[in-house]
Amino acid sequence: MRRLLVALCLLTVAPGALPAFGQARSQLGPLCTTETTPADQMVDACTKIIALKVFKGEQLATVYFWRAVGWNKKGDYAKVIADTTEAIRLKPSQAVYNLRGSAYFDKGDYDIAIADFDDALKLGPPSGIIFHNRGNAWRGKRDYTKAIADYDMAIKSDPRSAFSFQNRGISKEALGDLDGALADVNQAIRLDPSLPQPLITRTSIWRAKGDFDRAIADGSEAIQLAKEKPPVNIMTPPNSVLISGYTHRALAYEAKGDYARARDDYKATLAIVASDAGSKASQATAKVRLALVTDAAAPIPRDTPSPATQPAASPTPLQTGSAPIPSPAPAVRGARMALIIGNGAYAHVKALPNPPNDARAVAKSLRDIGFSVSEGVDLDRAAMQKMTRDFLREAARAQVAVVYYAGHGVQVDGRNYLIPVDVALKPGANMTEAMIDMDTIMAGLDDQVRTNILIFDACRNNPMAQQVAAAGNTRGIEGASGLAAPTSLGTGATLGAGTLIAFATAPGQVALDGEGANSPFSAALSRHIGTPGLEVQQMLTRVRAEVVSTTKNKQVPWSNSSLLGEVYLAEK
């Protein structure tokens, strides 16, 4: 699910008096430089004016600027950047820097966007619009304190800026200030009741508060408004508001347990053309969650766990076809859930003795501190996929979700995969189809109202080395050791508003399986994870220090956190 992209109207740029250039072409100027001109006509008219080669300097910069506006309407941000760069070369202006910065924002290049907004502000005078847009970029970087400071400046400049109030509300929500967020969003709605964006934000706030009916009501109203009056703001990516509305309402339906309506909303999200990074991230989440709510596989009954899988709480069975899908009782707010998998009994690649022991030890530690744990050891692909999907489906109603995996992992073309025990790859086979994509798990957990802790002791060696060599280089398979740094915390994703990812060792490095009953990393983790009153990042620091000492500096655990506050897995 993406954060809302909300930008105010573009700074007005006087097109300048374009000289006459023939009776037959007299309409090209107004078509090029009128904001309400349809995108294709605007681009076509500006392109024809440029082709005349009769303008230069500031006048030519103006034409490039307006063609960039046309490209922006079409969601072609690479061309926006190309044309605004040429306009800046010819004649820098606040408006051109602002437009280029907004295009970089839409691409997810937040640092470059901030640099452009800085340059725009240096040209003066101070602009609430540019402060607002820079606040969006800080929010994209998850620096919510700086985002709020910029929104404060925008509101000071324009106290009736509904978008600045609602985006400041988003930032407060991310920092856990739900009441402050609600106050800001309510003010945005009072200022402009016709806007769908504040209602979408309030949908998320109600869901975080556990009030799913209000969340659904606000999401429905936002979708209706977006359909009746699509945003005409030239700085708003095409379809972004509608995609966000459907995604937020779908998550509210799913949290309530209404899988049928959630499924319809996820399908609606995927049917819309996405142009910006945030909307594409929303669609990645929608794709995963659609598979979860339409999954026909029945869960393993609670009273008959298999020898390999021992789920502590099985999700409600799903039905297929047109029959209604039963709705489970909504989880009590504050529910804490964990998925624990340990694979070691590999049939076709090197077996690992310790992952089952590691999984059991970590699962026990989490159960002891009150987590509902789904635990599996030595899972084949079908069982591993099913357990993962069942957990992701249930995690939609959790406040804290922990995922722990021990076993073989591999990076293929820079993406990380977890390896079931029945993997058997042959030359010419599609390697990734036999494995579990870590990015899919991360997309399924992408939700700004939940804290996610993902821990992978999964880079003990590269078991695919021989298969990669045999398969040749025709598909560009990467056979590097260890796992790659995760990409799902990057451009556009909202996973990270409350997420921590930990690897047993640094990306690209190999972890040790250990000589005892547990790996060095998991042994330390199971000892410290249940320590009362120990903040999770401090806990991982203790784990890191113990692993470094135990392995004599051969292994250094690695983590990447975007948690916005202190998280305690075991109460103080």
Image (tube, grey):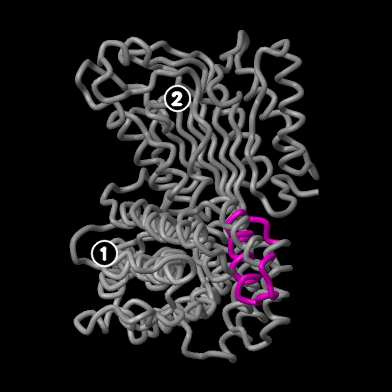
Residue 31 is situated, as x and y percent measured from the top left of the image, at 30, 80
Q: Nearer the viewer, residue 49 or 115?
A: 49
Please name the residue shown 35% across and 41% down the image: 386
Q: Name the amino acid type tagged 1.
A: Ala
Q: Is residue 477 rendered to the left or right of residue 16?
A: left
Reply yes or no: does residue 271 show up in magenta. no
Please name the residue shown 73% across and 48% down the image: 568
Q: Quadrant of residue 129?
A: bottom right
Q: Quadrant of residue 210?
A: bottom right
User: What residue range appears in magenta?
Assistant: 122-144
Please name the residue shown 61% across and 28% down the image: 361
Does residue 150 sit above or below 432 in this rendering?
A: below
SS type, badge 2: strand
Identify the residue position indicated by label 2 in the image: 409
Q: Nearer the viewer, residue 299 or 555?
A: 555
Label located before the other in sequence (1 or 2):
1
Please name the residue shown 58% across and 14% down the image: 512
Q: Residues within 10 Å of mark 2 (few under 14, many from 20)?
A: many
Q: Name the amino acid type tagged 2.
A: Gly
Does residue 511 sit above or below 63 in this rendering?
A: above
Could one spot residue 244 in this view of the protein? no
Identify the residue position indicated by label 1 in the image: 271
Reply yes or no: does residue 124 show up in magenta. yes
Residue 140 is situated, as x and y percent measured from the top left of the image, at 57, 57
SS type, badge 1: loop
Q: Is residue 226 rendered to the left or right of residue 524?
A: left
Could one spot residue 160 in this view of the protein? yes
Does residue 500 sit above or below 15 in this rendering?
A: above
Q: Nearer the viewer, residue 108 or 529?
A: 108
Specify the principal SS of the magenta part. Answer: helix
Q: CA distance from mark 1 to mark 2?
A: 33 Å
